[in-house]
Amino acid sequence: MSYRKALDTRCALLVMVLLWSTAGRAVEPVSSATASDALGFIVQYRSTPFGPPTANSMKLFAGSLADRSGTKLRATRDIGPGLQALDLVPDDASRSPADLLRSLQGDPRIDFIVPDERRQAQAAPNDPLFINQWYLQSAQPAAVDALGAWDITTGDTDVVVAVLDTGIRYDHPDLGRVSNGGRVLPGYDFVSGESNGTFLVANDNNGRDADASDPGDWLTTADKSEPIFANCTTSNSSWHGTRVAGMIAAITNNSSGIAGGTWGSPLLPVRVLGKCGGRDSDILAGMRWAAGLPVPGVPDNPNPARILNLSLGSTGSCSAAYAQLLSELNGRGVLVVVSAGNEGGEVSAPANCPGVVAVAGLRHTGTKVGFSNLGSAITLGAPGGNCVNGGGQACLYSLDTTSNTGTTTPAADFLTDQFKPNVGTSFAAPIVASIAALMASTNRNLGTVQLRNRLREGATPFAAASGGLPLCVTPNQDSTPQISECVCTTDVCGAGMANALGAVRAAQRPVAAIAAPLTTAAGQDVRLDASGSGAACGRNISGYTWEVVSAPTPAPGIVGANTAVATVVTPASGTVVLRLTITDDRGLTDIATVNIGSQFVSSPAPASANSGVCPSPESPAPEPPTPPAPQPPDPAPPTPPTPTPPPTTTIPPVVAPPSSGGGGGGGGGSLAWVSLAMLALLVALRLHLRSQPFKPTRAALS
């Protein structure tokens, strides 16, 4: 054997002994920690000129990463070449998962490190007719992917959705009263009698009362002899309120019927429409009551709603009465969702009022369905139902929901389907109301502004024009009703197509808040307080960053730039624009700005966004009759809306592997550094000797 080969062999043996002696000590036993204390990560180590790291060297690297990050290495699991799972237990239990991840990133030995997420089977309901509810799935471009959202939340029982409509059929088997295991709360009937003492519109022989049941709203030719119905159209009973209610709150995961957009949120029926519609005075009173505001002569609502659905309207502008009430509801954090209307023209009132979420109707392909109204007042689009084929054939893209067979008074309950179809913007709105309820269940700190903006943020972009279809145009450019299919743009159909998964992911971001004085003076300190910022349920704010976006020269300094409270000196002239970025303990962020002039301070951010009403883990809200699937993982920081959102960034609990024996342990991380240094020295020595001219000795030749 040559001298060089002998040296190579000895170096290799020494390396093997060293690796063998340290491999067993790279994982430190953590006897006092529970499985939930461990945080899981997946790390990809960089390859060397000799190839991917070996299993033993990955154990050493893992130990050194643990030492560097101030954690104990509980376990490692090799996944593939250079790819390894780590279970780490922080020495400081108060450290957030996001902080630990940041401390591990940037190591020159790794390509990437990501959380080891926990996944569950998708929360698909077992309702047998769910298969026909295309609009809640994801195969069609306009479908809202409720399945994906339900993996995050199925809705909480304390987020109430009110439906202001014709009333409801409480006895429908896929609805039912909450007191009997159903989804419908006791509501109220706000349809008043006529001034002459009759109750023709109410059609129930009385005025306002605590019975929100729908008696039917049929209208006959004989009825039109009454002056109040002279301009109305004859029709059978619509059971409109029951149809809208089923879109939101059909009992889900009960092995029967269809699924609702939420599984947990109760529905509050508020009857405001009767024969030939209803009056604004009754609708406004119903809105106040539904939101928890007092209405003279009516008992207070014990179950105030967070979301109000109004699948109603008529042509005309937004009245001052609606604008005033909507401003009050927005201040209370109550979101109002309104259908755009079905005339193919300008958005109806009150969908055209400021502060509402106005919903246009889309075909399954994402184009505007012919009947839907459109215009700049639209917030976003959602499935409105369309049949594709006619001539008595099946309506392929009906929106299946709860209804009744009675043509006048109530008869048998049933579910709409392709042969008894259900279409209209009236049923696009409750799809969005359901999404809003899921969002509010996920993050109780979202106000109406955040709910509206994040519905837009999570929307799927409209598809580009194709197939020779015309672009939709704003009604003020062409007053002719656009009653045919057209290609949506953000000018006339809102921010995009409603997407439940995208919206719920957006809802999980924290909410930045800035409390600041309204006035100031040149040279004075301005104190900006972001401690009122709020995180989604089960999360906490972990970081604050203040930075100057623009300012007069020289730019002012920021005292406390990385704390909740920052101080800036008021400029003598011009405006200083600061940006606040808050980060929660899952790495999700929100941004807010504040403007400071020589005499004023202003910010669009709320002064406080921490409502403190998240359900307590120790006292969960009552479950629905059939409990939903296991709780799903949380998502990653937001990205621009796409049909396929990015992977999530939750750091879930990881179960520790069985113990491999007693005694000993400790020091794996520190020993790894020493081991790596010795390995590097041996490799360097070997390379140095290889580079030297070989001068054989007599011993080497013998």
Image (cartoon, grey):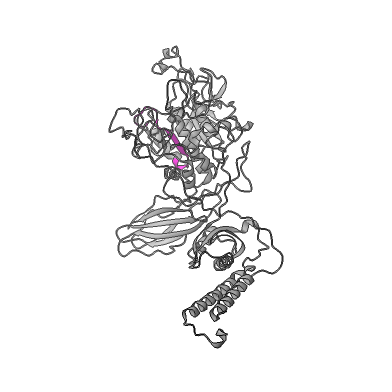
Q: Where is residue 327 in the image (x, y as percent from the top left)?
A: 42, 39
- Magenta segment main secondary structure: loop
Q: Position of residue 420 (x, y in %)?
A: 50, 23
The quadrant holding residue 235 is top left
Regarding residue 621, the answer to whether it shows in the image is: yes
The quarter of the picture where the N terminus appears is bottom right
Q: Where is residue 603 in the image (x, y as percent from the top left)?
A: 39, 52
Residue most extreme to the right: 662
Q: Does the magenta stretch include residue 668?
A: no
Regarding residue 300, the answer to whether it shows in the image is: no
The quadrant holding residue 280 is top left
User: Nearest the camera: 533 or 296?
Assistant: 533
* Residue at x 43% of width, y 56% of height: 581
Residue most extreme to the bottom: 698
Q: In this view, does 354 lie to the left or right of 153?
A: left
User: Nearest the camera: 90 or 602?
Assistant: 90
The quarter of the picture where the C terminus appears is bottom right
Q: Where is residue 414 in the image (x, y as percent from the top left)?
A: 55, 24
* Residue at x 52% of width, y 79% of height: 685
Q: In this view, does 20 lie to the left or right of 503?
A: right
Q: How many marks?
A: 0
User: Nearest the camera: 312 or 498?
Assistant: 498
Q: What stretch is highlighted in magenta?
A: 330-348
Identify whether 319 is placed above or below 116. Answer: above
Q: Is residue 334 magenta?
A: yes
Residue most extreme to the left: 477
